[in-house]
Amino acid sequence: MAGRPDPEQTLIETAQRGDLDAFNALVLRHQDSVYTLAYRIMGEPSSAADAAQEAFISAYRRLDTYRGGNFRSWLLRIATNQCYDELRRRQRRPAISVEDLPGAEADDGPTLPDPTDTPEQIAQQHELQRAIQLCISALKAEQRIVLVLSDVEGLNYHEIATQLGINLGTVKSRLSRARAAVRDCLQSVRSVRELLPSAYRLTDDNNVD
């Protein structure tokens, strides 16, 4: 009905007046999206949970800076920055192999399987999703962020540029390099090579051992 108040906007305005219950209701609405983004960037559940929690704490403290627009996008921008800051703090650590990356033994990321899938198909899809996440985790922080925002969250070039405060050319360059790196990484995982979508397969199968 025309003129009916938007429930989310009402919650936002109430939360901005200091109502913690209203903010908690907003957290419940968006916690899955924020956690999923954090998981894809951070690469493993505990770090993702920590980043998501810190993002919501930061959002609560900065509610007065929200000036309208898509509230989910505003939250995801805060979560992205939280993850990026953490990744940059980790850059001092020695390089590690794909097999040693977080998530190699457990993965909470993949969606629930289709009930019509066979056990073999479910196992294959889980293996593929795990391999993809490991390859994403192997990317440089700036490439990983752009790839997740584009190919997981579905943001376009302009939205990514705005969210990260970089120009379009940088977005395109980082995304191109990230996709190429993930494709090369997946090609090196023999057990998932045949499960890959065509876009991630080598054009000449004879080049694959």
Image: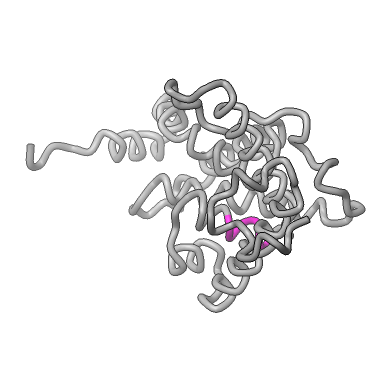
User: Is 143 one of the magenta-colored residues?
Assistant: yes
Determine which quarter of the picture holds residue 207: bottom right
Residue 113 within the segment the image draws in magenta: no
Tell me the quarter of the picture where residue 134 sits: top right
Nearer the observer, 140 or 90: 140
The number of callouts visible is: 0
Q: Is residue 128 above or below residue 80?
A: above
Please provide percent x and percent y for residue 55: 58, 42
**Residue appearing at x 59%, y 25% in the figure:** 120
Residue occupying the far front of the picture: 206
Compared with 84, 23 (above or below) is above
Q: Is residue 183 left or right of residue 26?
A: right
Nearest the eye: 128 or 146: 128
Q: Position of 127 compared to 22: left or right?
A: right
Residue most extreme to the left: 2
Q: Residue at x 70, y 36 (%)?
A: 44
Q: Give the colouring mode of the picture.
A: one colour
Q: Which residues are magenta?
A: 142-147
Quadrant containing the C terminus in the rendered view:
bottom right
Q: What x and y, as percent, mark residue 14?
A: 35, 34
Regarding residue 178, the answer to whether it shows in the image is: no
Main SS class of the magenta portion in the image: helix
Residue at 42 percent of width and 24 percent of height: 21
Instruction: Name the residue rendered at 61%, 62% in the picture.
Output: 179
Q: At which x and y percent is residue 181?
A: 69, 62
Q: Quadrant of the N terminus?
A: top left
Question: 66 or 141: which is nearer to us?
Answer: 141
